């Protein structure tokens, strides 16, 4: 196990339905997702005192490993599209697994759009992790076997990856151009890839070589790299993952379709909307998070379901 002090960020979004029907002291758990080796979920708790109701959003963090561990950082909490808490500090460990934030009471329900449903988001920044076992490599790209079968060396950060030019060129337009002599570095014995994290590149190659699979913990890194490296097959596999497996919120998926141009995911998002969809909860804080086409489809869909 190793301590990891590299800053990491991610977001969690959850829409809780039938909030009006929650009993006193009832707790509802959102979907569990894995990020950076630990499990996260949003929890919503309801309380009442006389005619006043109180809704408490909680962030839950659990490690799949036994023994001593800790995760610390900060988070911004959004409720109903409006800022609720900013820079909330947390420190989870094997004893403390829940961040108890403040509550929203009845008088503020309209401001935070709490009615029959409630939309809660956590934008998390991890500053330090201890005792979390790092994922083991499924394939080594720097051992004797890799060196014997390679005809190119890629330097990423402080690591070297011994790879096959033809294989990478077949799956990536970036590498096809790189190895065909269109880059200044093409003739060098070792080629440096800048602005890429070696751990992310390791996971990308493992998926490319079909020795590892796309999962919640790596899909964002692989999507970003496959877009940058123009690896179309892997890029579409990431899109399929978001369509068929991922439990990310509808709002988040729509934002992804703008950032990465994912037409099939966009189509599935809109096809899945019904009269019970709370369109207000889908509106992003920054209008630029949806492109013009998404906004157009968004309003047309909302009008068609009235």
Image (cartoon, rainbow, N blue to C red):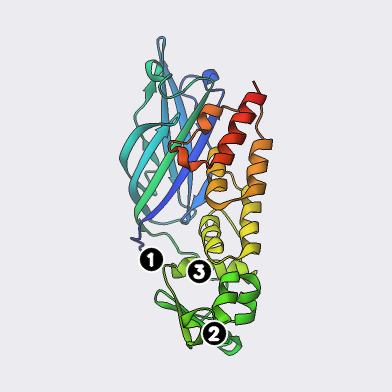
For marks 2 and 3, the one nearer the N-term is 2
Tell me which residue sits at (42%, 59%) in the image: 132
Disc 2 to disc 3, C-alpha distance? 15 Å
Which of the two marks, 2 or 3, is nearer to us in this view? 2
Q: Which secondary structure lies at badge 2? A: strand
Q: Which secondary structure lies at badge 3? A: helix
Disc 3 to disc 1, C-alpha distance? 20 Å
Tell me which residue sits at (30%, 41%) in the image: 87
Q: Which secondary structure lies at badge 1? A: loop
For marks 3 and 1, the one nearer the N-term is 1
Residue that label 2 marks:
152
Residue that label 1 marks:
2
Quadrant for residue 97, please give it: top left
Disc 1 to disc 2, C-alpha distance? 31 Å
Residue 212, how many percent across, how many down? 61, 66
Quadrant for residue 8, please give it: bottom left
Residue 2, how many percent across, how many down? 38, 66
Quadrant for residue 292, please give it: top right
């Amino acid at each position: 196990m190793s301590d990891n002090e590299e800053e990491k960020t991610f977001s969690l979004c959850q829409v809780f339905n039938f909030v009006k029907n929650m009993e006193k002291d009832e707790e509802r758990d959102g979907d569990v997702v894995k990020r950076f080796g630990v499990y996260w979920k949003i929890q919503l708790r309801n309380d009442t005192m006389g005619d006043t109701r109180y809704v408490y959003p909680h962030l839950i963090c659990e490690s799949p490993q036994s023994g001593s561990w800790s995760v610390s950082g900060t988070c911004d909490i959004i409720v109903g599209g409006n800022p609720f808490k900013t820079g909330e500090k947390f420190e989870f460990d094997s004893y403390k697994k829940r961040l108890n934030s403040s509550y929203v009471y009845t008088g503020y329900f309209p401001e935070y759009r709490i009615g029959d449903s409630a939309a809660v988001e956590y934008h998390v920044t991890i500053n330090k992790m201890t005792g979390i076992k790092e994922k083991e490599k499924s394939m080594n790209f720097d051992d004797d076997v890799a060196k014997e079968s390679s005809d190119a060396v890629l330097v990423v950060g402080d690591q070297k990856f011994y790879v096959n030019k033809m294989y990478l060129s077949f799956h990536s337009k970036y590498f096809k151009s790189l190895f065909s002599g269109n880059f200044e570095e093409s003739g060098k014995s070792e080629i440096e890839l800048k602005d890429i994290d070696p751990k992310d590149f390791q996971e990308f190659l493992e998926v490319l070589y079909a020795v590892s699979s796309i999962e919640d913990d790596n899909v964002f890194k692989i999507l970003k790299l496959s877009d940058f490296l123009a690896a179309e097959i892997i890029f579409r596999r990431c899109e399929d993952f978001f369509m068929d497996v991922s439990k990310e919120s509808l709002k988040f998926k729509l934002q992804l379709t703008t950032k990465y141009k994912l037409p099939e995911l966009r189509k599935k998002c809109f096809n899945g909307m019904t009269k019970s969809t709370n369109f207000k909860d889908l509106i992003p804080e920054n209008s630029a998070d949806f492109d013009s086409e998404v906004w157009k489809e968004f309003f047309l869909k909302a009008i068609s379901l009235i």
